[in-house]
Amino acid sequence: MAACHSVDPDRWQRGFDELVERIASRFSRVEPRRRVRLFVLGLLAGLPRVNCWTIAEHAGEASPDGMQHLLARSVWDAEVVRDDLREYVVDHLSDPGAVLVVDETGDVKKGTHTVGVQRQYTGTAGRIENAQVGVYLVYSATRGHAFIDRALYLPKSWTTDTARCRAAGVPGDVRFANKSALAREMIGRALDADVPASWVAGDEVYGADPRLRADLHQRRVGYVLAVACDHQVSTPAGKHPAKTLTGWLPARAWNRLSAGIGAKGHRWYDWAPIDSTDSTDTGADGVHALLIRRSISTGELAFYRCYTPTPVPLATLVAVAGRRWTIEEFFQAGKGLTGLYEHQVRRWTSWHRWTILAMLAHAFLAVTAATTGRNPNTARTHRAHRERDPAPVHPTDRPQPTQHLPPAALVTLATPPPSQSPRLPPPPTSTPTHLITNYGWRGRRRGV
């Protein structure tokens, strides 16, 4: 069994029995109750390939018919088991400061009959391929991390083709929803269930959605969401693209901080937060900022929209931004350890049942690791997806010089800088003025 070499067998068995007993009541008959246990054991068995054939062989069955029946026709509700999974994760990993991390991943497929498949971009391949895409939600806590929800992205080419949806078993009430809308639904479901979490993190797909940000404002849940370089940000100096604002920062605005430990050690970057006036525009109270990340080695920039109900240290925002990479590692681990995307199912119901059982198996490994001090996500994973959010690592793990500032030292652009010629420097009298604000301390500095 995966990770058995590091866990006492009796302890492992007790933990697995607890997990199975938690969902047993969702299966009214003894046959599916027995088979789901064997199915999850097969997902945890480290099989070279994971599908109904290999899981059935591992369970000692002569054919995959029973496992296929469990996924396609047996009577049980995968969404109720999803709620059990979420409660299991929270019971063992609960953390009031946890981060809900959302992201999508794709699985390259052949043909046109698998539910949700079409030619679309997938980070798995790093290009446009014939693929199926799912959106996932991870609970990232101090003690460990685990999947707690998922949703299948159904493109318009599917939702506008009633016959195709009917053939794949898609319910008649399913309508088109983009990835951000699916994320809003999953995050709302988790928060409505009182999942203890203070933050939400995600990439540009989710940072660009004003409805998601508004929902989190209303709930007073902080977020650090990536945005594109041309994303418009409101500041005291006016509304400008994020990349333009970077050029107006004083040198002292940058702080070297680690975004967490990666495969090669700490991920060191230079960070700078810029004060945003979104609270004025949206009517939402709290602290709004644009957080800028700059690579030490290449100078590559990344941008994040941030919100906190109350001021927090800059290091906290950086730590939340770093947690976004958690889900990339989980996609690797989920696919490698529990066969999250190795299925060979085509229909709507089978996809939702397979993914929830794979997530259940992975959550068991995460909880087991949390009690033994080992991380199952690194057992077969040596690198994370880096298609859209590369994580360059500083060549040394030695602590780097860091400016320790009070809560979220924001650079406030007090006056709009004039346009500058690409060749000639502006006259001294037109140098923009910046305010460095530390929530209670304000000092006027000249731009550098």
Image: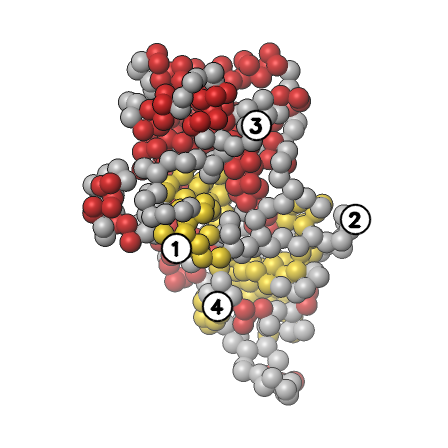
Q: Please name the residue that numbered disc 2 is placed on.
A: 398
CA separation in Å, label 4 and label 2 = 34 Å
In whole angstroms, how far apart are the C-alphas of marks 4 and 3?
44 Å
| Residue at mark 1 to residue at mark 2: CA–CA distance | 45 Å
N-terminal-most mark, 4 or 3:
3
Number of residues whose C-alpha sits closer than 10 Å to that of mark 3, classed few (under 14), some (14–19) or many (20 or more): some
Amino acid type assigned to the residue bearing label 4 in the image: Asp
User: Helix or strand or loop: what does disc 2 sit on?
Assistant: loop
Mark positioned earlier in the residue sequence (4 or 1): 1
Where is residue 25, by image quadrant? top left
Q: Residue 10 is drawn in which quadrant?
A: top right
Q: Which residue is mark 1?
A: 119
Q: Are marks 3 and 2 in contact (CB under 8 Å)?
A: no
Mark 4 or 3: the one toward you: 3
Q: Which residue is under mark 4?
A: 230
Q: Is residue 367 visible?
A: no
Q: Secondary structure at mark 1?
A: strand
In the rendered view, tell whether residue 131 sits above or below residue 142: below
Residue at 31 percent across and 13 percent down: it is 29
Q: What kind of element bears circle 3?
A: loop
Please give the label number shown on residue 46. 3
The amino acid pointed to by label 2 is Arg
Pointer 4 local density, CA inside 10 Å: few below 14, some 14–19, many at least 20: few
User: Tag count in the figure?
Assistant: 4
- Please tell me the numbered disc located at residue 393: none
Q: Residue at x 64, y 88 (%)?
A: 424
Measure the C-alpha gap from mark 4 to mark 1: 27 Å
Are dots 4 and 2 in contact, CB under 8 Å?
A: no
Q: Amino acid at mark 3?
A: Gly
Q: Position of residue 320 (x, y in %)?
A: 56, 46
